[in-house]
Image: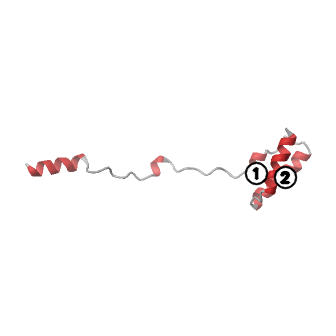
Amino acid sequence: AWDDAAATAEALARSDPPEAVAQVVGLEQRLIAAHDSGRHTVASALPPPSRRPHVSHQRIVPKGESLLSRLRRWLRRG
């Protein structure tokens, strides 16, 4: 597991991450070298995934004439 963690941290360090991520990766590399499993994980160095907006934040496109509009139109004709 330590070899996999070291390889992952090395790959992250070589990917030219943002400064904050690079600092965490450096910390992770030191913890991996010391075999210290009690503090952090490599996942803490990864940026959070982007969130999709909730369905209620989307606009609903009107699908045509409403029932009330149809009734008014029918009653005006008669």
Q: Position of residue 50 (x, y in %)?
A: 61, 52
Q: Tell me the element at label 1.
A: helix
Q: In the displayed orientation, state which residue is furthest to the right.
A: 34
- Rendered location of residue 17, percent (x, y): 76, 58
- Which label is found at residue 27? 2
The answer to whether marks 1 and 2 mark residues whose Cβ atoms lie closer than 8 Å is no
Spatial CA span between label 1 and label 2:
9 Å
Q: Is residue 76 left or right of residue 38?
A: left
The residue that appears at 22% across and 48% down in the rendered structure is: 68
Q: Of the numbered discs in the image, which one, if any, rests on residue 28? A: none
Q: Report the residue at 25% width, 50% height from top.
A: 65
In the rendered image, the quadrant that contains the N terminus is top right
Q: Which residue is mark 1?
A: 45
Residue 2's spot in the image, x, y percent?
Answer: 87, 41
With respect to residue 18, does 38 lie above or below? Answer: above
Give the residue displayed 82% in from the left and 49% down from the top.
9
Q: Residues within 10 Å of mark 1 (few under 14, many from 20)?
A: many
Circle 2 sits in a helix, a strand or a loop, which is it? Answer: helix
Task: Of the two numbered discs 1 and 2 on the same chain, state the one appearing first in sequence.
Answer: 2
Residue placed at 80% from the left, 47% from the top? Answer: 8
Relative placement, left or right, of 71 versus 61 is left
Classify 10 Å Cα crowding around label 2: few (below 14), some (14-19), many (20 and above): some
Q: Amino acid at mark 2?
A: Leu
**Among all residues in the image, which is located at the extreme top?**
1
Residue 66 % position (x, y)? 26, 48
* Badge 1 amino acid: Ala
